[in-house]
Structure formats: structure tokens, C-alpha cells
Amino acid sequence: MNPDHTNDNAQPWWMQKSLHELDKEEWEALCDGCGKCCLHKIEDEDTGEIFYTRVACRLLDIPHCRCTQYGSRHMVVPECMQLEPGFEYFEWMPTTCAYRLRHENRPLPDWHPLVHGSPAKMHEEKHSVRHLAIPEATVHDPANFVLEETL
């Protein structure tokens, strides 16, 4: 995938198409690999507000911010969101998520690997979970690890 591929309006490919128009390769390339979607979330039943915790899914390789069983994650963790074309629950995704940003017709941030050229800036600026996530196996109650900041 050439991130510099542009049309006559000099827009990068990810701005040229809606999420529904992306092919599988483009869809996968849009993910920044931050791991935020792999953190346990808690929904306030009264307000519907979603809170992120520091607790990472048991399949997340925290230092690399990658799922260890990506291809079969839905079988291993049935509650894992199926973030694929047709996904509708963007309010459950981090505010910096490229899928959510594109759904909202907003640009990708300058630290996004497609914009910057590598994931290094994302990690350096702490936009990934590698600096804050803790393994699910070490936690009894994720509610004790709710994050103060919005992701």
C-alpha cells in the first residue's frame, strides 16, 4: 500500500473513500496499531458513557500493541468487537481511532503511521497503550483501573 497514492485533489487514499469503499488491505492499513480498542471498557448504565480501563485483553501483546491471535480473536474472545467493514459502534472506539475519525469524516492525526510513515511517533507521543496497559490476568476487577483521561 502506497500511503502517498493521491488523486487529483492531492488527498491521500484514506480520505478519498468512505469506510464502506475500502478494500480489505486498505481497511487493515487504516489501523494505527495503538491497542486502545483492546482495553477493557465499562459502560455507565445510566448515562451510556464509556470508560476505558488500563486492563488489556488477554490476547494483546502489550509491548507491540498487537493481538497475538488476530485471525481467531473472535473465537477466543467472543466479546471482542468485530471491527471490519460494516462496523456500526464507533462510540465504543477511542476518539483517536482512524476508523472512528474516518466515520466522522475527520483527518488522521499527524502521529498516525499512515501520515507519519511509521508507528514510532505514535508510541513516542504515548498514543498507544504500551505505556499504560496492564495484563488482564493480573487484575481481579477492571473497575479499579478506570482511566481518568479520555482515549
Image (spheres, rainbow, N blue to C red):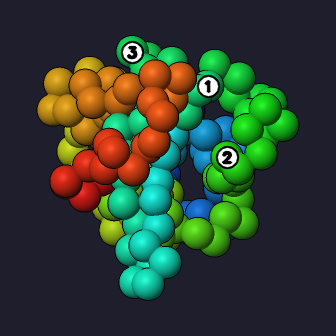
Query: Residue type at mark 3?
Result: Pro
Q: Nearer the viewer, mark 1 or mark 3?
A: 1
Name the element at disc 1: loop
Q: Nearer the viewer, residue 104 or 144?
A: 144
Residue furthest to the left in view is: 125
Amino acid under disc 2: Cys
- The three-letter amino acid code for the residue at tag 1 is Leu
Instruction: Classify mark 1: residues with Cα within 10 Å, few (<14), some (14-19) or many (20+).
Output: some
Residue 91 drawn at (x, y percent): 47, 70
From this view, report whether residue 105 is shown above or below residue 10.
below
Q: Residue at x 26, y 49 (%)?
A: 147
Q: Residue at x 41, y 66 (%)?
A: 50
The residue depicted at 47 percent of the width and 67 percent of the height is 43
Q: Is mark 3 in CB contact (under 8 Å) with mark 2?
A: no
Q: Position of residue 116 (x, y in %)?
A: 26, 33
Confirm whether residue 82 shows in the render. Answer: yes
* Residue holding disc 3: 63
Lower position in the chain sequence, tag 3 or tag 2 = 3
What is the secondary structure assignment of the residue under circle 2?
loop
Mark 1 → mark 2, Cα distance in angstroms: 10 Å
Residue 9 visible? The answer is: no
Contact, mark 1 vs mark 2 (Cβ under 8 Å): yes
User: Helix, strand or loop at disc 3?
Assistant: loop
**In the image, what residue occupies the spot 20% across and 32% down?**
126
The residue identified by callout 1 is: 59
Q: CA distance from mark 3 to mark 2?
A: 20 Å
Left/right of residue 115 with respect to residue 104 in the rendered view: left
Give how far across and how far down residue 145 sits, in percent: 32, 42
